[in-house]
Image (cartoon, rainbow, N blue to C red):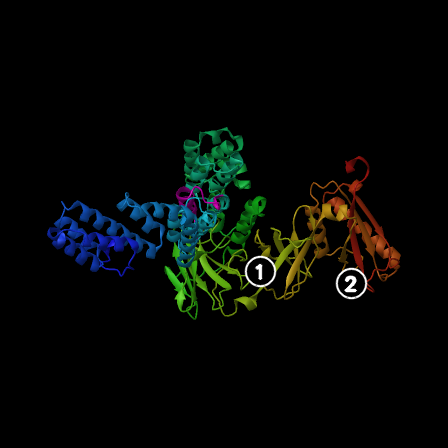
Amino acid sequence: MMFGLKTFRLKLSSIFFFFFLLIAQLTFSQTEVANHLKEAYNSKSIDSLQRFIQAYPNETIYVEEALRIIDQMAFEIVSQQNSIEAYEEYIVKYPNSVQSIKAKQWIELNSKRIKLEKEESDYESAKKTNTIESYSDFIIKYPKSKYYNYAKENIYRFQYQQNILTYSVEELIQFLKRYPQNPNNKYIFDTLKVQTLRYLSYEGFKFISNNILFNIDIEDFQLTFAFSFTQGGETKNFEKLFKDFPSLKSNSKLLHNYQEAKTIEALLTLQDIDNKTYNSNKQFFTTIKNDKSLELIKKYIKPFIDQKKTANINKALEPIENDFRVRQFQEMLFQNPPPEPHNKGISFNQDSTIKLIIESAPSGYGNKDIYVSLKKDNIFQTPFILPKPINSIYNETSPIINKEGDVLYFYSDNGMNNQELDLYISFRASQNSWSDWSIPLKVNLIDLKNAKKNYNRGYVLNQNSKPIESFVYIDDAKTGERLFLSQTNNKTGYFAFPKQAKPINIISINKGYISKYYSSDKDIIIRQDLIDDLYSKKMILTIESIFPDEAPDKLSKPAENYLKYLVKSMEGSKYVITISVHTQKGYKNMTEEDLSWHQATLIKDKLIELGISFQNVVAAGYSNSHPLLGWEGKSRIEIGFMIIGSQEE
């Protein structure tokens, strides 16, 4: 490399002075050789000196002098380059030269400094390039560098950024296989567990079960997956699990579910279901064992539907009416069918800024799912899947979305469908998130323009403002008639229901929680108080009087409904419920105190009638003798809880 240069200007040194003296002393016969050496020297070219040596190999004294001059010339070239590589190459090429000793001394004195400078330079270069390749090349070249860990961290960062884009099960598995040392793997593995259970991915289930990379409760994970994976009621899914993971057979509940699934599948093969079959298999018609139970129940009531025997249908569905799918099925019976689905694989909102895509993908929830792609800078971005409760293990198709992207119509054969494909509507709670949707409600009309005007939305939250999954009852405020039943999103507590022409009471009921009636307004926030929390904090729930002003001496239907909801909330409770009635005025011949005690007695008797033990109800009337700030002039009821005697243990 450094010897490709042909000529250099060199200062006259002592060695050349002696060289000229030597030439002067030569005999006349040697003058020609000496002149050639002088010419080669004057050319200042190593190549010329080497050609001289080749021309006069037997002229020992002149050859030795030429070699010394070459050694000196080459060393001065190396000195100008002043690099470890140049000095090292000089030592290799001129091992016997006097200057090689100087080269070794220079290397010994400067190599550490120069190597560090080179390492610094190469790391800065790797940072400037800033790619996984540049950092990889650096750590290969400098495995003991002080920058090794920094480079490695950047490699890990690029591995993550370049390979984790959609968080699909397939992507996560591939990452864990390809980068077993990546420090993000604990997070990747945890995410894989979440996604596997979310999408019921059998591929993810097998990988985790066969590659326990981190400390997890594998038995709990496998059972959680197995129960969800088999909820559809397909016996082939049970058999697939038992074949691949025989240890699951040891779980008696899972095995029991398998036997029930086989019975349901056998019943579904029957031409029709007569009374004898129904009575001998009654448990399969009065409880929902799995999703195929819905098919079986529909098969049983089909003759009643064909004959429009509403009473028979209601009686058959009454034991399972707490399943929201069943309630929606009932509400849509005998209504006009929805318009036909458009069956397009891709559709857009009004201004083509939102693209809806129907796709069947391994990373999806089920057969066909709805994906969304948003336009940014005039380019549609990578599609993402809509979450539950929009997508399910069933088919979701033919979506229609409004311009703002917060009202979605779509078709699905989800569970207990009335048509081959039922039409649903769902509302997005926040413009900032595509993951918070109301539970889809069955409808038979598409009206994007007025959808938000025609529906109320709200949240059900506990005493700590955390979301609660529950039914939301919409009752006529005057008659107590059930007008609609909605359900909250289990993750966000969000719900929707169609606006009613009548004044309504809204209430959400959950076992162990106490709620109160709400009237419809713009922002509905239904609060539920945990009974345990009320008791531990010695708090009471204050509600408006449930007695109507026009007849405060009687329990109205809405009042009876509220007490039924109260009993449902307290089912299995260990607490004694206390009822304190506060009235502001009397009625007819009753004073305020008389009326308050009368109302307290009516409430107590009704609670006992509805199933609460008389020992667990304490009711009293206080007329208007105990005023409460903020309730001036208003009748109220205070509900509290206590434990008596040994029950407190």
Instruction: State yes or no: residue 178 in magenta.
Output: yes
Give residue 312's position: percent from left, percent from top.
Answer: 54, 47
Give residue 310's position: percent from left, percent from top.
Answer: 54, 51
Give residue 642's position: percent from left, percent from top.
Answer: 79, 44
Q: CA distance from mark 1 to mark 2?
A: 28 Å
The three-letter code of the residue at mark 1 reads Phe
Q: Which residue is mark 1?
A: 497
Give residue 269's position: percent from left, percent from top.
Answer: 41, 38
The answer to whether residue 165 is seen in the rendering is no
Which portion, as a residue range, is magenta?
166-185
Element marked by disc 2: loop
| Horizontal side of residue 556 vs 438, given as left or right | right
Q: Quadrant of residue 524?
A: bottom right
Name above or below for residue 379 compared with residue 485: below
How crowded is the residue under tag 2: few (<14 C-alpha within 10 Å), some, or many (20+)? few
The three-letter code of the residue at mark 2 reads Asp
Q: How many marks?
A: 2
Numbered tag placed on residue 549 in the rendering:
2
